[in-house]
Image: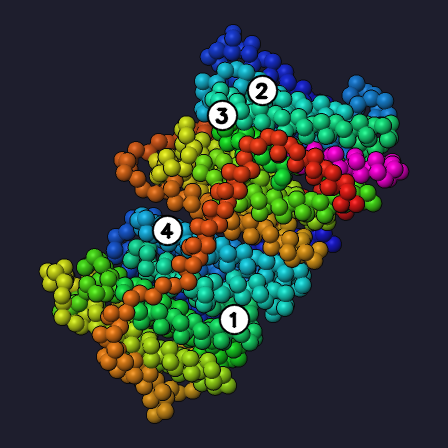
Amino acid sequence: MLQDAIQSLGFGRFALGIDAVNMIFVIAFVMVGTMGLLYTLASRPPIKRAMLSLVFVLASLGCVTAGNMLTFLIFWELMLIVSYLMIVSAGTARSRNAGFRYLLYHVIAGAGMLVGVLVQVSATGSMAFSAPTNAAIPFFMLGIGIKVGAIPFHTWVPDAYASASPSVSVVLSGFTTKVGVYAIIRLLPGVAAIPYMGAAMALVGVLLALLQKYSRRVLGYSIVSQVGYMVAGVGLATASGIDAGSLHVINHIAYKTLLFMAAGAVIYRVGSDHLPSLGGLIRYMPLTFICALVGALSISGVPPFNGFVSKYWLKLALDGQPVVLHALTIAGIGTGASFMKLLWYTYLRDPENRTVSSGPKEVDPGMAIPMLLLAVFCLATGLRPDILAGYLPHAGPAPDPFTLSGLTAGAWPPVAGVAFFTVARQLLSRAPEPPDVDALYRRGLVLMEYVAYSLARITEDRLQGNLMMILVVFLVALLVFR
Amino acid sequence: MSHLPILVIAIPLLFAFLIPLISMLFPSVRRITVTAMGLVYAGLVGMMIWGYHAMGVDRVIYPLGGWGPDVGIVLELDALSAAFAGIMGLGILLVILYSQDYMEAAESKYYVLLFIVASGIMGIILTADFFNLYVFIEMSAIASFPLVAVSRRGTALFASLYYMVFTLVSSALILLGIILVYAATGSLNMGEVAAVFDTIPELTRASIVGSFVIGLSVKVALIPFHSWLPPAHAEAVSPISALLSGVLLKNGVYMLMRLLPIFGFGDGSLDVRTLLLVIGVLTVIGGNVLAMGQGNVKRILACSSVAHMGYIALGIGIGGALGFAGALFHSLNHMLMKAGAFFSVGCIADGSFELSGLRGAALRTRPAGITFAMSTAGLIGLPPFGSFASKIMIMFAAIDAGMIGIAAVLPAGAVLSAIYYGRVYQVLYAPSEREPDDVSISPWQTTIVLVVTAVGSIATLVWAGNLARIFATIADYLVG
C-alpha cells in the first residue's frame, strides 16, 4: 500500500514521447528554436548566454513531450530556472529586477501546478495525464493561468521580455506561454471558464499594447493578447478548437519571434527601442523593415499570411461562443492598430532623432538569414495551410480560408485598425503609458517584507519572553490537545 | 558487524583525546591526521550500515559488556538508526574536511569538540536506553556550545549563551520526561517501555509525551521555540553553522521519529499529531517570514532552517508512513543543501555576512558562487534537486490524508523562500565595480566538499525512486 503510493509518484520514471497532441508543438519549438539560436549566435553573445538559450529550448521541448506529469513538472520548473538565468544574464539592474519578479510569478505557478498534480495523482493513483478532478482545477487554473499570462497575472510577460537582452528575448519569448497553452490541452480540457479567460487576455493585452512606448513592451503585451486567442481555442476542447489553437501556436511563435528579431536588430543598430525617439529606419534598414512588415501583417491576420488562417479557423471554431468571438474581433482591430503604430514610429515616419539620422547600417547577414527564413515561413504557411494541417492534433477537415467571406473576415479588422491608428495617432502619442496591476503587487511585496522585518525585530533576542513561550505551549498542549 | 556499534561511539572519543597530543608532539601532521580521523570515522559508520544491511535482520542488539537488556545497557541498530547514522556521518565528515581549509588556524580544541559531537551523535542514534540517550544529548550539546563561540566575537559569545540556555531547558524537559517514564514503568529500556506504555495512567502519559515533544521541539527549533537558532547558526563560523543546521538539528528529528512511535503518538492522552501539524504550519510560514526580514545571509539561511524543520514536523504530524518517509528523505536533503549553502557562503564572504557588503561577491568566488546558487535553489524546492522529491512525498501524504490545506503550506513556503533567496541573488550575483577577473578559487579540499554537497543534492532526485522506497520501508516498519 505504501510502496504503491511511492510507485504512483513515479520517481525515477522519466518518460518523453511525441504523439498527435504535441507534434505541432515539437515542430514549432524545433524550427523556431533553431532560428532563434542562429540569431542569438549571430549577435555574438557570451558563450554562457548561448548555452542557456540552447538549454532553454531543450527544456521547453522536454516539457511538451513529457509522458507523465512528474516529468512535465520537472521540465516546467527547469524552464523557470533557465529563463530566470537568461533574463538576469543581461547584467543590468533592470534585468535583475525583472528576473526577480519573473522568478516569483513562476514559483507561484509551479506551486499551483504541484498541488494540482498531487491532488490528481491522489485521485487517480498514477502520474499519467488525466482529466482533472474538481479539487485539482483551481490549482491548475492558478499555475497555468500565470504561465499563459492570464489577466491579472500577465504583467511578467512584457516585464521580462522587454528587460532581457535582445539576443535572449528572441528565444525566451517563444516558449513559456506556449507551454502553458499546451498544459491547457493536457490538464484542463473542457473547463468552461477558459475561453472567457482567453477573450479577456486578447482584449486587455491589445489595449495595453496599443499604449506602450517601447517596441518590445508592445510585443510583450501583444503576446498576452495573441496567447488569449490560443487559450480561447484550446480551452473549447473541441477538435476544431484545439486544432485552430494549436495552429495559432506555431504561427504565433514564428511571427512573434520574427518581430522580436526585428526589434532586436533595431536595438543593436540604434541602441534603443523607445518608439518616440525612433523613426525613418526604412531608409537604412529596408530588409529589417520588410521582415517586420511580414510579421506585422501575419500577426494582424491579413491574408495571405499565416495569422490569417489560424484566426479564421479560430473564429469558425468559436461559432457557439458569441462573447468570445466578438472580443477576438475587437482585439483584431487593436492588433492592426498597435502594429501599424510600431511600424510607423520605427520605420515609416520622418526621423526626428540624431542617432537615427547618423545612418545605422542594415542588420548582419547572420541575423538577417533567420529573419528571412521565418518571413518566408509566415507567407508559405499562409498560402498553403495544408502544409501544417496534417500535423495538428485532430487533423480534421480544414475549411478553406480563401473564400470571399473568409478573406473579408480576415481583412477588415486590420484595415479598421490601421484606419483607427491614422485617425487617433495624435491622441495615442499623448496618452501616457498606463500603470499595470504589478505596481500593486510590488507595493504588496514591499509591505510584506516590511511586516517580516518588523516581526523579525520583535521576536529577536528576548530571552525571557521566548523562554516563557515554552512553558505556555507546554501547558496549552496538556490542556488543549487532549 | 561485531563491535562496530560501540566503535563508532568510542573511536571518535579516542580521536578527540589524541588530537591535542598529536598537535603538541607533531604539529606538522595535524592536518593530515585529522583528515584521516574523519575518514576513519565515516568509514566505520559506513561499515556499520553496510554490515547491518548485509545481515538482513530488523534490528541488531549490541549488549555492552555482555549484559542483556534486562540488567545491562544495550545499543540497538535498526533501519532508522542506520539511515540517520548515514546522514549524520556524511555530514560530520563534510564538516571536518571543510574545516581543514576554513579553520586553518584553529586551535586543537576545535577538533576535540568536533569529535566529541561526532561521538555523541552516534550515541544518540544507537542507544536503546533512555538514560544514555540523555547522556549523549548532553554530550553533543555541551560540546557544541563552545563551538558556536569559537570565533570569540562578542555576538558569537552571546549567541552561544542564548543557545545554551534554550538547549538546557530542552534537556531539562527531556530529563523530566525520562524521570516520569522511569517512575511510571521502572524501566529505561526503550523496548520495554514501549511494551507497557499503554498501561501508564492517562495524565502521566500525557505529561511524558508533552515534555518529550516540547523538549524536542525546542531542540529542533520549531516556532515558537526557535529564537535561539538564528543567532547561534548565524554567529558561528561557517563549518559550525553547517554542523548545527545540517547535522545537529537532525538529532532532534531522529529522536522525534524514534520516540513518538514508542509513545504511540500519545494516542488517548495527548494529540501529538495535531500539535505537530499546528506547530509545523506555524514554523513553515513563520520561519520563511522571519527569513524575509533578515539582512544577513547566514541569518537568512538559519531562519530557512527553521522553516525546513517545519516541513519535517508536518511530515511527522500527518501521521502516516508516507509522511514519515518524506520527513526522513527531507532530513537527508536538508543536510546536503543547508550544509552546502553554509559552506558556500563561508567561501563567498569573509568576515561580514551582511548583504549590503556582499555585492557581486558570488561572482568572484569559484566554485562557491555556483554551489551556493544550487544549494539555495534546492532549498526553494526546485528540481533538479532532491528536496523537490521529498517535498512531493510530504505533500502527497497530506493530500492522501485529505489535508489539502496542509499540502498547500509547503509550496506556499517555497514561494516565500523564493522571495528572500531572490533578493539574495540580486545582491550576490550583481556585477560590481571591482575587477571582474579578481576571482578567488577555493582550495581543492574545500572544492571537493562543495561539489559533493551540490552534486549530492541533485543525486537524491536522480535516485529518488530508490531512496523513497528505502525510506518508505523504514517508515513502514516504524509506524505502519
Distance CA(mark 3)–CA(mark 4): 34 Å
SS for callout 2: helix
**Amino acid on which the number 3 mark rests in the picture:** Thr
Circle 2 crowding by C-alpha within 10 Å: few under 14, some 14–19, many from 20 = many
SS for callout 3: helix
Q: What is the total number of numbered labels drawn onto the structure image?
A: 4
Q: Is A421 in the magenta?
A: no
In the image, B397 versus B228, the foreground residue is: B228
Q: Are marks 1 and 2 on the same chain?
A: no
Q: Chain of mark 2?
A: B
- Point out the stretch of residues depicted in magenta: B196-221
Q: Nearer the viewer, mark 1 or mark 4?
A: 4
Task: In the rendered view, tell whether residue A292 sits above or below residue B48.
Answer: below
Q: Nearer the viewer, mark 2 or mark 3?
A: 3
Q: Nearer the viewer, mark 1 or mark 3?
A: 3
Q: Position of residue A224 (x, y in %)?
A: 40, 68
The reply to whether dot 1 and dot 4 touch (C-beta < 8 Å) is no
Q: Position of residue A68 (x, y in %)?
A: 57, 61
